[in-house]
Amino acid sequence: MYIRPVQRHDLDALTILAKNSGVGVTSLPDNKQKMQAKLEQALMSFEQSNAKEDRLYLFALVDEDTNDVAGICALEASIGHEDVWYNFHVGKSVHASRDIGVHKVTQTLYLSNDLTGSSEIATLFLMPDYRKDQNGQLLSRSRYLFLAEFPELFDEYIIAEMRGYSDEEGRSPFWDSLGRHFFQMEFSDADYLTGLGNKAFIAELMPKFPIYVPMLSDEAQSVIGRVHPHTEPALAMLKSEGFDFNGYVDIFDAGPSVSAKIKDIRAVKESHIQRVGLSERGPLPDLNDKHGLLLVSNRKFDDFRVTLVSRGAAGDDTLWLTQKQASTLNVTEGDTVRVVSLRPTENAS
Amino acid sequence: MLVVRPSTFVDLAGIERLLDETDARVTTLPKDRDKLSEKISESDDAFRSGAEGPSSFLFVLEDTDSNTVVGTSGIDASAGNGYPFFNYRLDEVVHASHHLNISSKVPVLFLSHELTGRTLLRSFSIDPQWRDTDGFELLSRARLMYMAADPDRFNQELIVEIQGIFDDKGVCPFWDAVGRKFFDLDFLTADYYCSVKTKTFMSELIPQHPVYVPLLPAEAAGNIARNHEAANRICQLLYREGFHKSKFIDPFDGGPVLKGQLNYTHTYSNIRFKKAKPSEVIGGMKYLISNQSTSDFRCVIGTLVDGIGDTIRLPLDISQALNIREGDQIAYSPL
């Protein structure tokens, strides 16, 4: 399995992915036209023919045996550029009176555009059949090697928006207590419209004044900043890389936004350059050995590739690859590669 | 005879008894002897000084036959008495998307000080035994008669806060949905503080951001600008007087604020002033009749026969009750 930039012929595969993704993955529209527009944007980004802040880097996880696209992930260079980027900032209002002995801290949601200009760890979706063998890890963490290689294309900070809590019927208690009053539609419809890139309606319909949290339903209050159960592994992965809740939540489902300074991300900080050596004797990656794996990228831009190799393949300055691995990465002996352990070492126990 | 006059310290026990017996909440009159006596003292100053600026008048309705206080009413010349006067203004914002064919008017409560400095009619309470007598009207309208005696001290715009909906146990759905979340107090306690503490705590605790009405529980939202049924009678009277519901509500219980223009109130616009001639009067029509003393004001209900002359005959018992001697000016307005 390896990661590469999306290509024009991936359109049908991406449309199938989107159909499978369901409610809550707002950046994957279940609509071929819109998907094509996204694909075009990504192709231009890898050609560097659009403005830096408009770039969307879409990567596909490819099964080299079948050439099937098994998953997709993305990096957004700068959010809130063409559209307006909205979050609620979870702040506090303090109401205190010494005279009558009251001191009350009230959580308050402030509509904000504060995250505008940040880079974003965007879409990630992996086909159910491929949710094994470290594919999710490879798909998600491969992006850090791209960030490590090309920091000048991104902001100092990168954020990730986590899908908020909704129940099995796709019902979001936060939406029901707040958004519904202003949008007069179901959460899944609102979500679909944002996914289509139809964001103007957010500005037109959003409540502009701050919202006192105690005025929402108890259920809504309890899900502010809480992720969807399916998103918990993704959140754990981001946290292990140094991401943390930044005090902003999604305006629809109150899912948390997490962020990190790019240079402080574990995989960026710990990644290093090695020279490729070819050898057929090196150990092959054991995909069951969680901590015995390394992410390797070829350091290229428009033909960026990432795959997993065994920790045992790394020498002092040399990374020993088989011919097959080298051709997957499109490198030859003597080229340099960027290497980092797939998982943080402090978790190795 | 029923007489409305300024309160004095002698009335203290009588007012206390009255507050115990009335079901209506009278925010501006605390059931606390020290605080009550402070109120009377403030009122005393207001009646005596004649000065400009914040003054707080407290009247009592006395049954002179039994020497009992059977009602209270008051005026704050300037709502807030020098502090901000808080209300919510019920307004609407339109959330519309042409593209999605959605348009909805969302009601929003905005904190407002706009009514600060208006003249506030307040502290209305009457002994249940006297509710269905002319005394009810006398007690309320005598305040407008008083303003006619010294109109420069009052604002043209009059406001009245009508008590909102809460039950016998003091449970107020509007309070529980709004104020309680910030004041951390139950309704009755907050209400009590409101009457005995300085108003600073209000400005410290009241939520500053607008409140979206659709976020409130249905019961609380439904009670906005609705009055307690115990206030039905006073509302009816005030509507007849020319008051109307405004966009403002009480920030505590959500009760309506009624507004009126002094000049256009029924009582004030029909007032006439004439020199009195104490004498026997036979027949005639019922009027509110008051003297023109700002410090020793008296107002009663009596019958007069009005003619075209500058002098009017005033029944002897009324002359006595109003401290009127021949040639003194009186004011009267049809009941």
Image (cartoon, helix red, strand yellow):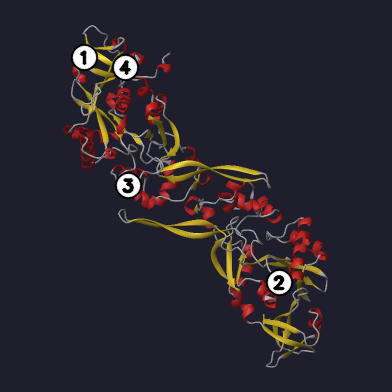
Q: Is residue B27 left or right of residue B325?
A: left
Cα separation, mark 3 vs mark 4, equals 39 Å
Cα separation, mark 4 vs mark 2, equals 89 Å
Q: Which of the two residues, B287 or B39, is positioned nearer the viewer here?
A: B39
In front: mark 3 or mark 2? 3
Q: Find numbered disc 4 in the image and state the secondary structure of the residue it sits on.
A: strand
Please name the residue that numbered disc 4 is placed on: A294
Residue extending furthest toward the top: A281
Q: Mark 4 lies on which chain?
A: A
Cα separation, mark 3 vs mark 2, equals 60 Å
**Do the residues marked 1 and 4 share a common chain?**
yes
What amino acid type should be assigned to the residue bearing mark 3?
A: Lys
What amino acid type should be assigned to the residue bearing mark 1?
A: Gly
Mark closer to the chain start, 1 or 3: 3
Q: Find numbered disc 3 in the image and state the secondary structure of the residue it sits on.
A: loop
Please name the residue that numbered disc 3 is placed on: A199
Mark closer to the chain start, 3 or 4: 3
What amino acid type should be assigned to the residue bearing mark 2?
A: Leu
Please name the residue that numbered disc 2 is placed on: B139
Return the x and y of residue B106 as percentages of the image width and height.
44, 56
**Do the residues marked 1 and 2 share a common chain?**
no
Return the x and y of residue A15 as percentages of the image width and height.
22, 36
Residue A334 marker: 1
